[in-house]
Image (cartoon, grey):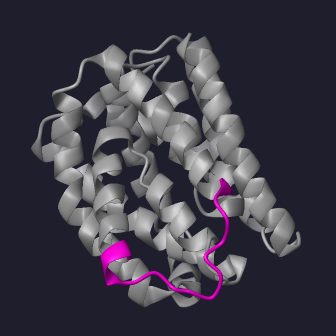
Amino acid sequence: MAGIDPVMLAAAATMTFGAAYVRGLTGFGMAIILVPLLGLIVTPAEAVVLGILLQVLIGPVGIKIIYADAHRKSALSIAAYAVMATPLGIWLLQQTAPDVARVLIVMIAIGAFILVLLPPRGELRPGPKETALTGIASGILTGFAAMPGPPVVPYYLRQPIPPAEARASMMLVFFATAIAGTISSVALGLASWRLLLLSLILFPPMLAGNWLGARSFGKIPAHIWRLFVALTLGLAAISAVFRLF
């Protein structure tokens, strides 16, 4: 089915369910966890496009609540810069050898973990320049690795804002980058009907995992939630490194 061995397809469905659960709980992490793993089943470029397609399919789920809870000014600003920068990331992916792309994607996952461990900013809010740089970096990483999160996650988690606001803001940004990534991958010839079919096959386990994660959100204290976010990134980075070798 979709040109993939049934056992590998079942493994991909399981991985997608787990990554979507993390997304539903934290607001991010699906691509950071999933793309390095999908790269073991398909090529790195296909894994990136598949990650983008999955994110655009899950993006509309709960969008009204997400939009209401998000810090819309910063989220929409970051999204605008990211959308403009996404084609550059896809172009860079096209120019990069598969083995090099795998290493870089793993490094991105590790970098995300390190950034989240940095101390909080205190009461100081990010300025326009930091917001713009966050958006540009997020867009480039969307196109290159289907991972808009590494710049965006520390941007929000290091601010003194409620988890619900941070989670919704990140999800709003990621939906916008997924749309931009899908359009860019189609325009640049990276997307295919095979990958679209595979994303539709993986949509049910993704939807189930996201629903379960969303139900878990809000039932744990804020400091535990932030700790879970950091641990998620750390485990994703360690897992990606082991699978690389």
**Which residue is at the front of the view, 211 or 224?**
224
Residue that appears at 16% across and 27% down: 95
Residue that appears at 61% across and 76% down: 121
| Res 33 → quadrant | top right
Q: Is residue 230 left or right of residue 136?
A: right
Q: Is residue 180 left or right of residue 216?
A: left
Residue that appears at 71% across and 46% down: 232
Return the x and y of residue 83 as percentages of the image width and height: 24, 64
The total number of labels drawn is 0
Whether residue 127 appears in magenta in the rendering, the answer is yes
Q: Which residues are magenta?
A: 117-130
Residue that appears at 26% across and 74% down: 80
Q: On screen, 101 above or below 172?
A: above
Please say whether residue 209 is visible from this viewpoint. Answer: no
| Res 205 → quadrant | top right
Return the x and y of residue 11 as percentages of the image width and height: 64, 22
